[in-house]
Image: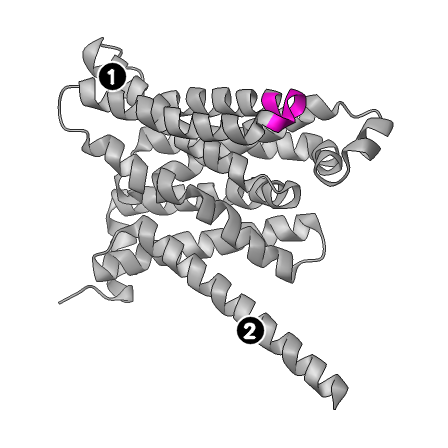
């Protein structure tokens, strides 16, 4: 007999691994709502995708150094942070200086990052199940160490957004106006990409590399439909992310399904329903005006 929602709520109170999973989803939602809003406004989802797939190289390298060379203090997410930030800086510099090569560089980093990760995994003794969980997400395997790291990354993201919101907003909406106001567009664009990279790392344990972009973009896309300001988009996007990750965890627990996949399917279904409803409502309003 499958567990019920009541069983899940009771289990959260009893089992630490469910508490860690719930906390990871909530932490991811904060960064997701904030940075996802900038990503949507600036329309750099494809760049976020390139950064996400470079992360596997960092994960694989960190595990290789930990297992083969005895760097036991090195966690795979440490390598993910380094790889994500390096990819963000490279892509940012290419975008700012050689825009015509942007697509090529992003595609190359996307493929090479994944390939490097596969090579490191191949040469690391033992079964790579832990790294595969990062590829497809396994929020139930989040450890206290990972939770503290996610909390630290979340704190960096929130602090930077609160400190530099106006500059980031200007860079996202109108670069020329930002320059006229004395904003260093290049620096803040690179900062935005680095914050996107950190957010990607925060989302990886929750839904995995393959599905990061969906969670980064879908809740915020719904927020854009419902809010009239960027702060409103951030708030709604963060709340919806929290709802999706929590509901995805609960449904996966009761139905014995992968939590990351359930979360993304749930977010996608809600987005499609809202989009379809908005389209139908718009047609009805036009028909009433004609009538």
Q: Which mark is residue 281?
A: none
Mark 2 crowd level (few <14, some 14–19, many ≥20, 10 Å Cα): few
Q: Is residue 112 above or below residue 267?
A: above
Q: Is residue 130 above or below residue 32?
A: above
Magenta span: predominant SS is helix
How is colour applied across the structure in the image?
one colour
Report, in whole angstroms, how far the alpha carbon at label 1 lies from the one at label 2.
Answer: 49 Å
* Residue shown at the point (55%, 46%) measured from the top left: 33
| Rendered location of residue 75, percent (x, y) | 31, 22
**Residue tagged by mark 1?**
64
Q: Residue 255 lies in what quarter of the image?
A: bottom left
| Rendered location of residue 41, percent (x, y) | 65, 45
Of the pair 82 and 48, the residue shown nearer to us: 48
Quadrant where the C terminus is found in the figure? bottom right
Q: Check whether the beta carbons of the residues at disc 1 and disc 2 lie within 8 A of each other.
A: no
* Residue shown at the point (29%, 23%) measured from the top left: 60
Magenta stretch encompasses residue 98 = yes
**Residue tagged by mark 2?**
277
In the rendered structure, which segment of residues is drawn in magenta? 94-100
Of the pair 124 and 12, the residue shown nearer to us: 124
Quadrant where the N terminus is found in the figure? bottom left
The reply, left or right, for residue 87 in relation to residue 172 is left
């Amino acid at each position: 007999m499958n567990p019920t929602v009541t069983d899940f709520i009771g289990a959260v109170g009893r089992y630490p691994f469910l508490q860690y999973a719930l906390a990871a989803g909530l932490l991811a939602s904060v960064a997701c709502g904030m940075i996802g809003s900038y990503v949507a406004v600036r329309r750099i989802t494809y760049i976020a995708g390139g950064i996400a797939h470079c992360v596997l190289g960092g994960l694989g390298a960190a595990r290789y150094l930990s297992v083969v060379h005895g760097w036991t203090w090195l966690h795979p997410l440490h390598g993910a942070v380094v790889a994500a930030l390096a990819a963000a800086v490279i892509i940012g510099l290419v975008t700012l200086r050689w825009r015509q090569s942007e697509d090529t560089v992003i595609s190359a980093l996307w493929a090479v990052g994944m390939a490097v990760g596969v090579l490191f995994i191949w040469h690391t003794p033992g079964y790579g199940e832990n790294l595969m969980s990062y590829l497809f997400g396994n929020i139930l395997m989040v450890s206290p160490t990972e939770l503290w790291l996610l909390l630290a990354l979340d704190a960096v993201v929130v602090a930077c957004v609160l400190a530099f919101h106006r500059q980031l907003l200007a860079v996202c909406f109108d670069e020329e106006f930002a320059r006229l106001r004395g904003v260093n567009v290049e620096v803040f664009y690179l900062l935005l990409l680095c914050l996107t990279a950190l957010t990607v790392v925060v989302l990886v344990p929750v839904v995995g590399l393959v599905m990061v972009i969906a969670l980064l973009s879908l809740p915020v896309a719904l927020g854009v439909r419902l809010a009239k300001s960027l702060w409103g988009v951030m708030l709604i996007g963060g709340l919806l992310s929290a709802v999706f990750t929590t509901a995805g965890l609960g449904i996966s627990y009761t139905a014995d399904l992968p939590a990351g996949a359930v979360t993304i399917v749930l977010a996608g279904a809600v987005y499609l329903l809202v989009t379809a409803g908005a389209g139908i409502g718009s047609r009805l309003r036009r028909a009433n005006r004609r009538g």
